Amino acid sequence: MPKPRSPKLESPTSRRKLPVRKKPYQVRLAPGIALAYRRNAGPGTWSVRCSDGFGGEWLKKIGLADDLEPAAPPHVLSYWQAQEAARKLARRQPGEAVDESRPLTVAEALDAYEKDLKTRGASKYNAGRVRLHLSGVLLSKPIALLDANELKRWRDSLIGTLAPASVNRTIKAPHAALEIAADHDPRITNGRAWKVGLATLPDAAQARNIVLNDEAVIRLVSAAHERDCRFGLFIHTLAETGARPSQAARLLVADLDPVALKLAMPKSAKGGSHNRAARKAQRFPVPISAALAKRLAQEPGGRAPDELLLMRSDGQSWGENPSMNYRRDFAAIVAACGLDSKTTLYSLRHSSIVRCLLAGIPARVVCARHDTGLASLERNYSKFIAEHADQYARQGLLQPAAPAADNVIPLAGR
């Protein structure tokens, strides 16, 4: 393949004839990639200029030019050597061996973060979803060239498109990905860029949970059973246990105790140990009704104890991200029941938690049953905690003695 020619840059002699200037001389190597040469009073320098095709670009120095001394890669490069270095720095070709000297881009950091999540047994959903919001400029930019202002501009561009709480959830993935990249590459020293630029929005956590009364929950469960028996069983289980869909999707046949009327619910990966896989393997007991226990006992058929308890009608699992498989069906039964269109499957969890609180169950017990923390419970359900605590608070009120009657008329002769 012929290489781009540039008579004024190809030899040290022709480069020394160029005027010294700050603006570099350039030669186009490929679409979006250019080799730049800056003529200095001493030896010149080679840099790669890379554009993403959307108006954004970055410039990175790759070495000295062989103006005053023989080429000695990787520090002193000839014109042809600088071309090869520029291409490798700008992009990896398919099938090309990984060049550890090449600076990692934001897109590659996200790829590495997804692999790290998979290794730790965590969901890759958020790491993948953030790509829908990141611009091509940021995705193609080397991490070492990021600055706080551009990251802050990107974060602020999400405001208005997403709710503040969703903005904070979205920026967590690139923040974590950049942290991991910096931990593994000592050349990345600009950690302040994402600590400042991707700072979370204040006061973003506002509880907007839709809580359903018992009658509405029962209608949803009935509608789900009418739509599809296995979908109905999934919804019924969530309505009674208040579990997250991702937890119920991991229930095994062995987790059902139809005699004790209990499920050994898998824990979520939230909080706790950094080893998410170990945490997800833990179980905690959740009581269920006799009716649900009977239906669940009939479900497995000939499945082994270590196989999944809840399956879809096509025989597949609900998956790592169950919402991809139930979202349309649940929206349909919400509409059929005449409920608020913003009602989600998590409304069953919110309703279960509130039902327990209003029944006078201690908050710590509610947390244990729903695999959540007291801080989260207070933040999201403080209104209902105050309501169910009212009857207990009244027991501590001051009870003054009844005032003496001052309108007693003595009887005659007394």
Image (cartoon, rainbow, N blue to C red):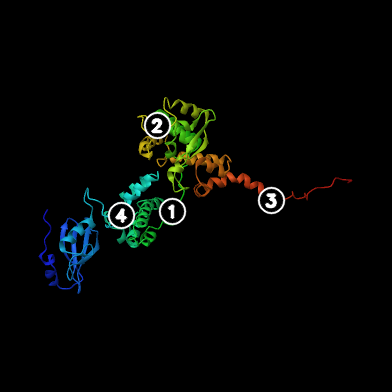
Q: Amino acid at mark 4?
A: Val
Q: Earlier in the sequence, mark 4 or mark 1?
A: 4
Checking the image for residue 106, the label placed there is 4
Q: Earlier in the sequence, mark 3 or mark 1?
A: 1
Residue 298 locus on image (x, y percent): 45, 25
Residue 71 locus on image (x, y percent): 18, 65
* Residue 369 visible in this rendered orientation of the protein: yes
Q: Secondary structure at mark 3?
A: loop
Towards the viewer: 252 or 206 = 252
Residue that badge 1 annotates: 204
**In the image, 26: left or right of 309?**
left
Which mark's residue is nearer the viewer, 2 or 4? 4
In whole angstroms, how far apart are the C-alphas of marks 1 and 2? Answer: 36 Å
Residue that badge 2 annotates: 311
Q: Earlier in the sequence, mark 3 or mark 4?
A: 4
Seen from this angle, which residue lies furthest bottom?
41
Is residue 346 depicted above or below 9 in this figure? above
Residue 153 locus on image (x, y percent): 33, 59
Q: Amino acid at mark 3?
A: Leu
In whole angstroms, how far apart are the C-alphas of marks 4 and 1? Answer: 26 Å
Q: Earlier in the sequence, mark 1 or mark 2?
A: 1
